[in-house]
Amino acid sequence: MRLILLGPPGAGKGTQAKLFAGRFGAPQISTGDILRQAVADGTDLGRKARSFMDQGALVPDEVVIGIIEERLRKPDCARGYILDGFPRTLRQAEALSQTLRAIQAPLDRVVSVEVPEDDLVRRLSGRRVCRGCGQMYHVEANPSRQAGVCDKCGDSLYQRDDDTEETIRHRLRVYREQTEPLIAYYDQKGLLARIEGCGSIEEISQRIARALGRDESRP
Ligand code: AP5
């Protein structure tokens, strides 16, 4: 399955991408995760990306396009991939089409996950992420069993630097201006499925599975 999960910050792209990656045996490719790792490692890429990310702005197209072109050529993408957070601009989408043509791995589907803005702000301000395995939690909707500790690997949970209310609002504006036009772009290509992103994580998974024409009872 070659899939893009499209949606605003907080729509649940990362949460669902992890579930479907496990189910399909295909990698979740999150430009946000790759960039955060680069920041944590203090690499050149991380230094370039940091100020954009802290402000909730997009990292320049040429930087993220380079990352994705390299990533999609790795052998683990042969069985498919789930793109989470890429593309985010029309230029990124055009570059992705070119790369996928070159490696003969066209997209199967683009699923747009749609959630009202107030819910997005609530979700992001309550999000906690595991330092060890990246598992996502929410302090109310999806808490870990023990506060601040990951259920899966026991490492500590943290709050992302860009999950403050002011930066969240800015990220949502950036989404509307630069990323939302991709909904029409992929619709015109006949690849788009829109799903309502409110409900439990399990319900959203089932909606995505239906949009992909897969068994609804899993994952
Ligand atoms: P990125 O990491 O991609 O962040 P984002 O798009 O802002 O998306 P989020 O990770 O915030 O949300 P999500 O939709 O994955 O939701 P999640 O599953 O975590 O990007 C960060 C930054 O990197 C960008 O601002 C930019 O600077 C840069 N960047 C990244 N890609 C780029 C690109 N292509 N071009 C340029 N710059 C780029 O869920 C959120 C919370 O909600 C969690 O707490 C979760 O537990 C909870 N939740 C999930 N589902 C539900 C549900 N059904 N009900 C209730 N709560 C739920």
Image: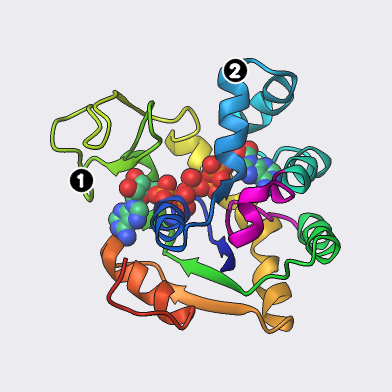
The answer to which of marks 1 and 2 sits earlier in the sequence is 2
Q: Which mark is residue 41?
A: 2
Residue 56 can be seen, yes or no? no
Compared across the picture, whether 184 is left or right of 40 comes to right
Compared across the picture, whether 115 is left or right of 143 comes to right
Q: The residue under label 2 is which amino acid type? A: Asp
Disc 2 is placed on an element classified as: helix
Compared across the picture, whether 197 is left or right of 86 comes to left
| Residue 46 image-quadrant placement | top right
Q: In the displayed orientation, state which residue is furthest to the top.
A: 42
> How packed is label 1: few (under 14 Cα within 10 Å), some, or many (20 or more)?
few
The stretch of residues the image draws in magenta is 71-89
> Ligand 1 within 8 A of label 1's CB?
no
Instruction: Identify which residue is drawn at 67% across, 80% down.
Output: 187
| Residue 87 image-quadrant placement | bottom right
Instruction: Identify which residue is drawn at 60% across, 74% down.
Output: 109
Q: Is residue 54 above or below residue 169?
A: above
- Tell which of 9 and 145 is nearer to you: 145
Q: Which mark is residue 140?
A: 1
- Residue 120 position in % (x across, y down): 41, 53
> How packed is label 2: few (under 14 Cα within 10 Å), some, or many (20 or more)?
few
- Judge whether residue 80 is colored magenta: yes
Q: Is residue 4 above or below residue 147?
A: below
Instruction: Identify which residue is drawn at 55% across, 37% down.
Output: 33
Q: Is residue 27 above or below residue 139?
A: below
